[in-house]
Amino acid sequence: MAVRYSARFTTTRSIKELLIKGADRDAVEKSGLKPIDLVDSLEDSDTKEELLQLLKKPTFILPCCHFRQPMVKIERSNNTVALFLMLMLGTFFANMIFVYPCK
């Protein structure tokens, strides 16, 4: 519904928030249309381009690093904890090898 009535909004911020909270990009209406299909009916080209960027499938390598704000809900994962521990231990050992011997 948000994409269908996006012409009434001044920005696409509300649609971004819905995607971050976990809204489904592939939701289908009774007529069989997906949100990305509804974008074609918009008149404003800037809004149309922005919505096309938001609604395409996200591809990212490390979502836990947040290089960019992912437009999907991030679920808790043991991989995030493992990455954090690996980076912390790497920093600790780098300090032990390179910084502390110089003092």
Image (tube, rainbow, N blue to C red):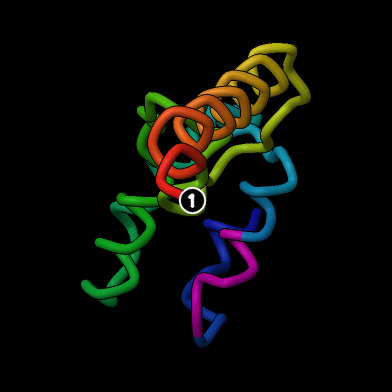
For the image, the number of numbered tags is: 1
User: Residue flagged by tag 1: what amino acid is it?
Assistant: Lys
Task: Please report the residue visible at 38 percent of the width from the left and 36 percent of the height from the top.
Answer: 98
Task: Please report the residue visible at 74 percent of the width from the left and 46 percent of the height from the top.
Answer: 21
Is 15 inside the magenta-drawn segment? yes
Q: Is residue 26 positioned above or below 53 on the image?
A: above
Front residue of 98/63: it is: 98
Rendering quarter of residue 43:
bottom left
Question: How far across and how far down the image is residue 59, in percent?
Answer: 36, 28
Front residue of 84/46: it is: 84
Single out the residue that lies furthest toward the bottom. 10
Is 3 inside the magenta-drawn segment? no
85 with respect to 103 (left or right): right
Q: Main secondary structure of the magenta part?
A: helix
Q: Which residue is mark 1?
A: 103
Task: Please report the residue visible at 45 percent of the width from the left and 37 percent of the height from the top.
Answer: 101
Question: How far across and how far down the image is residue 36, in percent?
Answer: 40, 41
Question: How far across and how far down the image is residue 33, in percent?
Answer: 48, 32
Front residue of 4/88: it is: 88
78 with respect to 50 (left or right): right
Task: Please report the residue visible at 72 percent of the width from the left and 21 percent of the height from the top.
Answer: 81
Pointer 1 local density, CA inside 10 Å: few below 14, some 14–19, many at least 20: few
Mark 1 element type? loop
- Highlighted magenta segment, given as a residue range: 11-16
Question: How far across and how far down the image is residue 19, in percent?
Answer: 62, 47
Q: Is residue 64 positioned above or below 90 on the image?
A: below
